[in-house]
């Protein structure tokens, strides 16, 4: 299993500013994932972050808007750049590890960062 | 684009009521179906990972069924308690990524 912490837990930001979200895992993992959930929408994968290489972004998400760092195997950051009200969401990081479900990996999530952009 | 739909969007029940919600997903290229419980200000927690058509899983008062041929899964909660109040997410794995539904928000009144 994994214990994941995120900072900040919530923030209220002004339009045009940037916010960096930190994610810390209590074990070494190869891949870390960043998701967001806009109000009333599904949890959507933003990007996959591998240590030592550039993050892989999903369709509709770009590095200039959501730069990601992955300096080691237990830590990652996601920056939401030049924010607008549409970026108001819950942002979660997650990792995939062998869990309780036999041979299938379980996805462990952080508690999320609730962002409101005014 | 894979579409995973959950219904209802929200549900209010009285303590002791039994309830169920639905997750619909593509019936092709099925690999696994995950159910999560997400309480406010906490991390989403995996309840079940289901892989075989006809699978039934149970954890305490919560159980789930899976029909991969028609593309749906049901989550049942027997004798709901206030501590069951949470958002219940399902996620479909057809390749190497999880595609989530928007969730069902359950509120249990005591």
Image (spheres, rainbow, N blue to C red):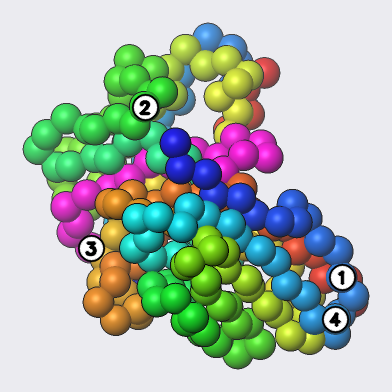
Marks 2 and 4, Cα distance to the nearest angstrom? 42 Å
Residue A59 badge? 2
Horizontal placement of B98 versus A85: left or right? left
C-alpha span from label 1 to label 3: 39 Å
Q: Which residue is mark 4?
A: B17
- Per the image, the residue denoted by label 1 is B13
Q: Is residue A33 magenta?
A: yes
Q: Which residue is mark 3?
A: A27
Residue at (60%, 90%) from the top-left corner? B60
Callout 4: SS:
loop
Cα separation, mark 3 vs mark 2, equals 29 Å
Whether residue A3 is visible: no
Q: Is residue A102 above or below residue A16?
A: below
Magenta residues? A27-42
Relative side of A93 to B110, left or right? left
Q: Secondary structure at mark 2?
A: loop
- Residue A83 is situated, as x and y percent measured from the top left of the image, at 52, 16
Q: Residue furthest bottom?
A: B60
Given the image, what chain letter belongs to the residue carrying mark 2? A
> Mark 3 vs mark 2: which is more N-terminal?
3
| Secondary structure at numbered mark 3 | loop
């Amino acid at each position: 299993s994994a214990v994941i912490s995120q900072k900040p837990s919530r923030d209220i930001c002004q339009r045009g500013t940037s916010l960096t979200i930190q994610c810390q895992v209590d074990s070494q993992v190869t891949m870390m994932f960043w998701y967001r959930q806009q109000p009333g929408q599904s949890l959507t994968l933003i990007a996959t972050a591998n240590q030592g290489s550039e993050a892989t972004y999903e369709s509709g998400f770009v590095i200039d808007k959501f730069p990601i760092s992955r300096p080691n195997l237990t830590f990652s950051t996601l920056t939401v750049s030049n924010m607008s009200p549409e970026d108001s969401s819950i942002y979660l990081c997650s990792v995939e590890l062998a869990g309780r479900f036999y041979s299938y990996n379980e996805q462990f999530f952080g508690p999320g960062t609730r962002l409101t952009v005014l | 684009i894979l579409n995973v739909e959950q219904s209802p969007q929200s549900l209010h029940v009285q303590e002791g009521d039994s309830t169920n919600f639905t997750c619909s997903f593509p019936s092709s290229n099925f690999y696994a179906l995950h159910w999560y419980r997400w309480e406010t200000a906490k991390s989403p927690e995996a309840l079940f990972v289901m892989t075989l058509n006809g699978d039934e899983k149970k954890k305490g008062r919560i159980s789930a069924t899976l029909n991969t041929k028609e593309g749906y899964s049901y989550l049942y909660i027997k004798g709901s308690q206030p501590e069951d109040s949470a958002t219940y997410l399902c996620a479909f794995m057809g390749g190497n990524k999880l595609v989530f539904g928007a969730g069902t928000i359950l509120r249990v009144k005591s």
